[in-house]
């Protein structure tokens, strides 16, 4: 079975390893036979994408020859940054399915016509996030984006504080009317997993959302029973 390549458009190898771990665990839980997830880290750019300049560099880095070589050997590719840098170009150059975590999370959050918000740490990407919602045709269900306070990179080095501030942003989204809330960022994957246990509405982690979208695109077989694909259950719940 071909591997899944998870590309981290940030330059942090620790973030790559964290995202690969989340992806591998999700696939093992939900698929009858899970492919291996291999991580690749951008060779240039920022350790965390916090503004449009960082996002622009990440977009160009996705075309680097080594990343493309690895992607052509994979059975499917995940772009592991919420802004989905280089997603369209990769899709144009590869014969395998390519999924962006931002796009996947937004569609998962809006499943069944749910109203959704986004909680994240990067206020200088506000316009980019809102543009992506519009680009995916989901603005009618979007309640807005809520941000944590302070420098996002400093917050990333204080995981407990980051989780608590993101929890406040999630609650603000719920107060805005969101029926599901996305934690907007690949490096926020661990926080998304932890916050999923704290709220009555679904808290969407972009990495699991991308795994599900890619598994469907690759036509992988779901595990039978309670660990099967969560998408139908989410849509049913939203419609009740």
Image (cartoon, helix red, strand yellow):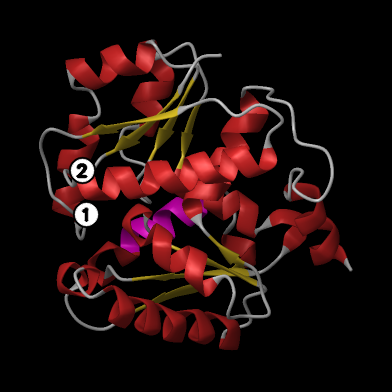
Mark 1 or 2, nearer chain start: 2
Instruction: Indicate which disc residue 13 carries.
Output: 2
Identified at 74% across, 60% down, the residue is 113
What type of secondary structure mainly makes up the magenta span?
Answer: helix
Q: Quadrant of the N terminus?
A: top right
Occupied quadrant, residue 131: bottom left
In-front residue for pair 124/222: 222
Identified at 55% across, 39% down, the residue is 211
User: As drawn, is 136 to the left or to the right of 87?
Assistant: right
Residue of label 1: 49
Q: Residues within 10 Å of mark 1 (few under 14, many from 20)?
A: many
Label 1–label 2 contact, CB within 8 A: no
**On screen, 33 above or below 156?**
above
Q: Can residue 135 be seen in this view?
A: no
- Marks 1 and 2: which is nearer the front? 2
Identified at 32% across, 56% down, the residue is 187
Q: Position of residue 130 (x, y in %)?
A: 42, 61
**On screen, 238 above or below 88?**
below
User: As drawn, is 32 to the left or to the right of 226?
Assistant: left
Residue range (magenta): 127-134
Q: Position of residue 67 (x, y in %)?
A: 25, 21
In-front residue for pair 172/220: 220
Is 23 contained in the magenta span?
Answer: no
For label 2, the SS is helix
């Amino acid at each position: 079975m071909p591997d899944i390549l998870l590309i981290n458009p940030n330059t942090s190898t620790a973030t790559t390893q964290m995202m690969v771990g989340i992806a591998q665990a999700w696939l093992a839980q939900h698929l009858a036979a899970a492919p291996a997830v291999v991580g690749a880290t951008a060779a240039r750019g920022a350790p965390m994408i916090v503004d449009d300049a960082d996002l622009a560099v990440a977009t160009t880095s996705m075309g680097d020859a080594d990343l493309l070589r690895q992607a052509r050997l994979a059975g499917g590719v995940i772009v592991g940054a919420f802004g989905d840098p280089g997603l369209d170009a990769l899709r144009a150059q590869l014969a395998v399915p390519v999924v962006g975590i931002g796009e996947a999370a937004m569609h998962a959050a809006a499943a069944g016509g749910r109203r959704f918000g986004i909680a994240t740490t990067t206020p200088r990407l506000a316009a980019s996030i809102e543009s992506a919602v519009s680009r995916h045709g989901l603005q009618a269900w979007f309640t807005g984006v809520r941000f944590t306070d302070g420098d996002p990179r400093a917050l990333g080095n204080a995981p407990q504080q980051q989780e608590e501030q993101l929890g406040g942003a999630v609650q603000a989204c719920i107060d805005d009317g969101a029926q599901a809330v996305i934690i907007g960022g690949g490096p926020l994957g661990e926080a998304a997993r932890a916050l999923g246990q704290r709220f009555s509405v679904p808290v969407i982690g972009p990495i699991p959302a991308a795994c599900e979208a890619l598994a469907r695109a690759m036509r992988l077989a779901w595990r039978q029973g309670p660990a099967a694909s969560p998408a139908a259950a989410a849509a049913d719940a939203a419609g009740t």
